[in-house]
Image (spheres, rainbow, N blue to C red):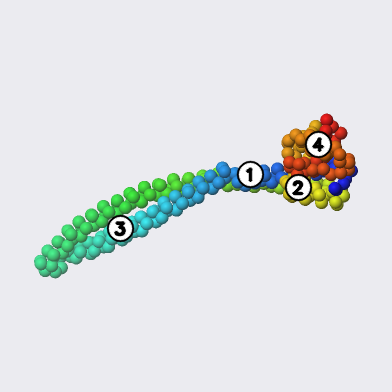
Amino acid sequence: MAKASPAEQLRLLDLQALDSKMRQLDSRARSVRENPDLKALAAKAAAARSALGTAATQSADIERELARAEADVASVTARLERDQKHLDSGSGGSKELTALQSEIESLSRRRSDLEDTELEVMERLEAVRGAEAERRAEAVSAEAELADLEAKRDAELAEIEAERAETQRQRTELAGRFAPDLLAVYERTLARHGIGAARLFHGTSEGSGMQLSPGDLADIRKAAEDDIVFCPDSGCILVRSSEWGS
């Protein structure tokens, strides 16, 4: 059975307090990283970016459609102006001029139809650009919300890390004051059970939170003061004090 003076065993509780604090800090950091609000905002921002991309693609498609419609109108207009100029010059025979007049009328109808199409495309483009502007505003807002929450997360994590570093420094300093054999027992117990040492107080193990059985208490009473005893439930080192068994 490993041995250590009662005073040194009692100091294990200080070491355990630092280990418990680091575990709490690790848990807190994990909670901060896994903040469901952060995940929800990230999903919201991603959805907003996707919606903006869809709207931008629609705008680009209709802009190309409008460019084609404008080119068609320009082409027909140029041909119409050319024919009209030819007709106004009066050059050519009557048959040619009659045919030219007929073509001008056909081109005029064609231009009218194309201008109607152009107007319809422009109206659709205006509507889609309005929707794109709304999607962009939503994306900017979602990104801003996400960035704000990420900044708060990073600040909190930095605060936790600083506190953990200081706790680790204190822990390293304190651990260096223990006898190597006792520290080794404590470290093995901590690694195996998640808790290295706890008080035995009025017959209750603070490691498990349970009252020890009369038989277990009787076995502990038989142990010398410098014997290291363990909690039968949690497996941690039980640190006895003067009132432990009362």
Kindly check if marks 3 and 1 are in contact, taking CB atoms under 8 A apart as contact: no
Dot placed on the residue nearer the N-terminal end, 3 or 1 = 1
**Residue type, label 1:** Ser
* Residue 64 screen position, x and y as percent: 36, 58
Where disc 4 sits, the SS reads: helix
Where disc 2 sits, the SS reads: helix
Where disc 3 sits, the SS reads: helix
Kindly check if marks 4 and 3 are in contact, taking CB atoms under 8 A apart as contact: no
Camera-nearest label, 1 or 4: 4
Camera-nearest label, 2 or 3: 2
Query: Which residue is found at the position 83% from the left and 47% from the top?
Result: 174
Q: Which residue is mark 3?
A: 69
Which of these two is toward me, 138 or 158? 158
Q: Answer yes or no: is residue 21 visible.
A: no
Which of these two is toward me, 102 or 131? 131
Query: Which residue is found at the position 85% from the left and 40% from the top?
Result: 10
Left or right of residue 231: residue 46: left
Q: Which residue is mark 4?
A: 217
Residue 244 quadrant = top right
Dot placed on the residue nearer the N-terminal end, 4 or 3 = 3
**Residue type, label 4:** Leu
3D distance between C-alphas at marks 1 and 2: 23 Å
Q: Is residue 92 above or below residue 231?
A: below
* Quarter of the figure with the C terminus: top right
Q: Which residue is mark 2?
A: 190
Q: Answer yes or no: is residue 188 visible.
A: yes
3D distance between C-alphas at marks 2 and 3: 77 Å
3D distance between C-alphas at marks 1 and 4: 39 Å
**Residue type, label 2:** Leu
Where disc 1 sits, the SS reads: helix
Dot placed on the residue nearer the N-terminal end, 1 or 2 = 1
